[in-house]
Image: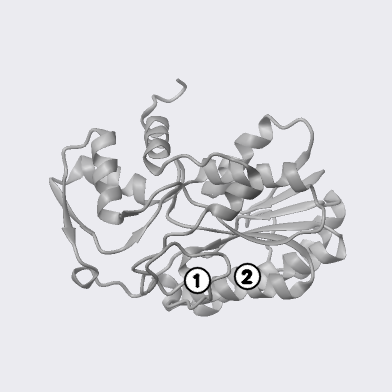
């Protein structure tokens, strides 16, 4: 199959590139904003035609949550219009669209892990544009897998793990919110799950929503504490409330995602959050070339 990856230089796209190196059965085309503007209809049409695309994995997104409150039009363009354009081209070419969404589509008022069928109620511009993107894909008529994830991190790009490790080298103590609960996702584990879905389904008819994170429920404070401990940092982490750390965009207080559906579908064992965090930090701390 011919597989197109958009946003290939981000956290998830980078991990998919690693998987592609060991995949001798499919042809992969990797694009980022400098080689394909997914908001440009004609450019996307040309790309699909040139590569004869069977599967499109959309890793591109506007993810600056607070900045989105001031850049709503740009966030809408990247998170909603672009997925619609990709979906329309998948429909036209009988291709499968795999689109990555977010826990921010939920309001965070829940008390038990969110199911794929639970109603969305986003509380931020970022969340609203991502929910809009989901809806446009579902209404397009194309074949799709939408995968909601949360707290994504990896050894590349900007993310919470890398920020905490940097602060661990420069600060004696930091404050981190302890009343927002969710679960981290190592980008490599998500990439593996996406590849598993492709192996199982190919580009056959599909109209499915999935949730994927690592296993477990923790707060940002728990996450930060574990990062310092595993990373060998001597920086003290103090728990604070959301009210003590005001942000422009509202974060969900509880956004744990139920993983039952994707586990049943893929028959994959999803690693516990701490196990994957240890592997990522080991990768980050490995000497170059080792």
259 sits to left or right of 81 = left
Q: Is residue 132 above or below residue 165?
A: below
Q: Which residue is mark 2?
A: 134
| Element on which disc 1 rests | helix
Q: Compare marks 1 and 2 and give the one earlier in the sequence.
A: 1
User: Left or right: where does residue 31 sit relative to residue 238?
Assistant: right
Quarter of the figure with residue 168? top left
| Left or right position of 109 against 204 | left
In this view, the residue in front, 192 or 47, is 192
Query: For this rendering, which residue is in front, 76 or 32?
Result: 76
Colouring: one colour
**Residue designated by label 1:** 105
- Residue 74 appears left or right of 170: right
Number of numbered callouts drawn:
2
Q: Which mark is residue 245?
A: none
Asked if the residue at tag 2 contacts the one at tag 1, i.e. Cβ–Cβ closer than 8 Å, the answer is: yes
Residue 161 visible? The answer is: yes
> Can you say whether 44 is above or below 263 in the image?
below
Where is residue 206? Give x, y as percent.
Answer: 76, 59
Where is residue 251? Give x, y as percent. Answer: 36, 70
- How crowded pointer 2 is (Cα within 10 Å; few <14, some 14-19, many 20+) is rated as many
Query: Between 33 and 100, which is closer to the camera in this rendering?
Result: 100
Q: Is the residue marked by circle 1 packed among few (<14), some (14-19), or many (20+) residues within 10 Å?
A: many
Residue 190 point in image, percent of width and height = 55, 46
Q: CA distance from mark 1 to mark 2?
A: 10 Å
Position of the C terminus by quadrant: top left
- Residue 29 appears in the picture as rendered: no
């Amino acid at each position: 199959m011919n597989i197109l990856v958009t946003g290939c230089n981000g956290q998830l796209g980078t991990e998919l590139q690693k998987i592609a190196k060991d995949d001798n059965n499919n042809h992969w085309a990797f694009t980022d904003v400098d080689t394909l503007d997914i908001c440009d209809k004609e450019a996307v049409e040309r790309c699909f035609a040139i590569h004869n695309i069977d599967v499109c994995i959309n890793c591109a997104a506007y993810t600056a949550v607070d900045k989105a409150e001031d850049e709503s039009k740009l966030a809408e363009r990247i998170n909603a219009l672009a997925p619609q354009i990709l979906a329309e081209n998948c429909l036209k070419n009988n291709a499968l669209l795999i689109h990555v969404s977010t826990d921010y589509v939920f309001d965070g008022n829940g008390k038990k892990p969110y199911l794929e069928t639970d109603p969305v109620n986003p509380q931020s511009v970022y969340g609203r544009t991502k929910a809009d993107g989901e809806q446009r894909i579902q209404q397009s008529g194309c074949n799709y897998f939408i995968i909601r994830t949360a707290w994504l991190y990896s050894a590349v790009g900007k993310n919470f793990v890398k920020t905490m490790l940097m602060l661990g080298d420069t600060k004696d103590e930091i404050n981190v919110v302890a009343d927002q609960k969710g679960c981290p996702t190592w980008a490599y584990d998500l990439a593996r799950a996406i590849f598993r879905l492709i192996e199982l389904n190919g580009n056959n008819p599909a109209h499915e929503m999935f949730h994927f994170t690592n296993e477990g429920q923790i707060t940002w404070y728990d996450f930060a504490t574990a990062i310092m401990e595993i990373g060998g940092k001597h920086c003290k982490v103090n728990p604070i409330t959301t009210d003590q750390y005001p942000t422009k965009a509202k974060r969900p207080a509880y956004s744990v995602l139920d993983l039952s559906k994707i586990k049943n579908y893929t028959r994959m064992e999803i690693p516990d959050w701490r196990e994957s965090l240890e592997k990522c930090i080991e990768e980050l701390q490995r000497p170059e070339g080792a």
